[in-house]
Amino acid sequence: MKRLLLLLLMLPVVAMAWEPSRPITVVIGNAPGAGNELAFRKLAQIINKTNKKLVFVVENRAGADSVIAMNHMMTVAPDGHTIAAFNHMSQYVTQDIWQRDIKRYEYNSFEDVLTIGKSPLVLVAISTSAVNTPDEFATLLRTTQTPVFVAVGSGAHRITFEYLMIKTLGNRNLVKHISFNGPAQALQSVASSAGGTEFGIMPLAIARALIDAGRVKAIGITGDRKVAQMPNIPLLRRIAPGINVFAAWNLVLPPRTDRVIVDYYADLFARAINTTEYQEWMDLNLIFVDSRESDPDGLRQHAQELRRIFLPLANQINSNE
């Protein structure tokens, strides 16, 4: 018996498979209706069809371009029972510039899991606006004699606004952005023209319903190709070459979360993303996923690429303010 016990003790230790043991809190860094929340809820719905014991509880913590939510994520236990859905551009780039004095983390403090969706950004205008094309918008930014306000809901939207201003030589004395706690709120401000926000920038996935309803009109989208489902929307690159900015959403876990937990969520959500149901949902909602960002290592590499391209631009914008 002693020899048997000794042999058992000498066997390699095999890590036990990890699974959640209680409901999972899902922190969203925006007000309800943002793209990261919509994408997460769809994936959770798909996952629950085969994993009914998993319970996801969404918790919106909007404010300061997700900084409130991210500061909170620095305080929770790294036990796998709290995850978050954040925005690429905010976490990896713009918060280092515009929220640096209030954030309590670095862009790489969290444990990245994977990207859950991306959507082109769209510049919209109130339905009664005299502006209908990217060229007319560029002319307005340069020549306006009255204040022009553009609603934005996250760091990606803000940097798109700033990029447009740089490329069109916009009048910074009269053209201003107004920040909201999420893209749905920015969109609603344009639809109602609350506070004089004649224009807004948000994910096309969020704006589509009001565009189709005629409550706002699409002026142009980011990226280098038109959207097949809405081919009449022109590209903003005609007035701002290189405007390859997207709304993009990622899952993260608290710092120092064990890799076995990170891998559990990466595998769980990657399988849901690859289902026919999610692929069809993405097509319907003008969303896509880059396969290179479908695991923690790929997402971290993408974060570095975003910083290489856009951090100098954000620093340039900040130095001009």
Image (spheres, rainbow, N blue to C red):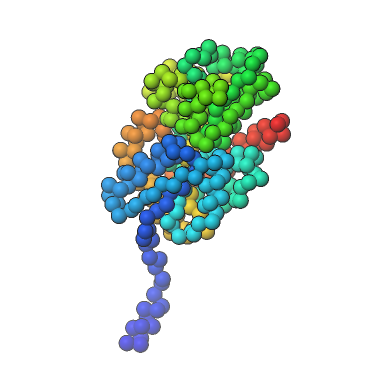
- Residue 154 appears in the figure: yes
Give coordinates of residue 240: x percent, y percent: 59, 22
Residue 171 drawn above or below residue 72: above
Q: Nearer the viewer, residue 303 or 320?
A: 320
Question: On the picture, is 215 further left or further right than 64?
Answer: left
Residue 230 drawn above or below residue 248: above
At a point 60% along the width and 41% down the height, the residue shown is 95
Give coordinates of residue 193: x percent, y percent: 51, 22
Q: How many marks?
A: 0
In which quadrant will I find the N terminus?
A: bottom left
At a point 37% along the width and 34% down the height, the residue shown is 282
Give coordinates of residue 116: x percent, y percent: 43, 41
Residue 78 drawn above or below residue 40: below
Question: On the picture, is 106 further left or further right than 271?
Answer: right
Q: Nearer the viewer, residue 57 or 115?
A: 57
Residue 5 drawn above or below residue 307: below
Q: Nearer the viewer, residue 196 or 204?
A: 196
Residue found farthest to the bottom: 2
Give coordinates of residue 292: x percent, y percent: 46, 41
In which quadrant will I find the C terminus?
A: top right
- Residue 290 appears in the figure: no
At a point 36% along the width and 78% down the height, the residue shown is 8
Q: Quadrant of residue 119?
A: top left
Residue found farthest to the top: 130
At a point 49% along the width and 14% down the height, the residue shown is 128
Q: Nearer the viewer, residue 77 or 299?
A: 77
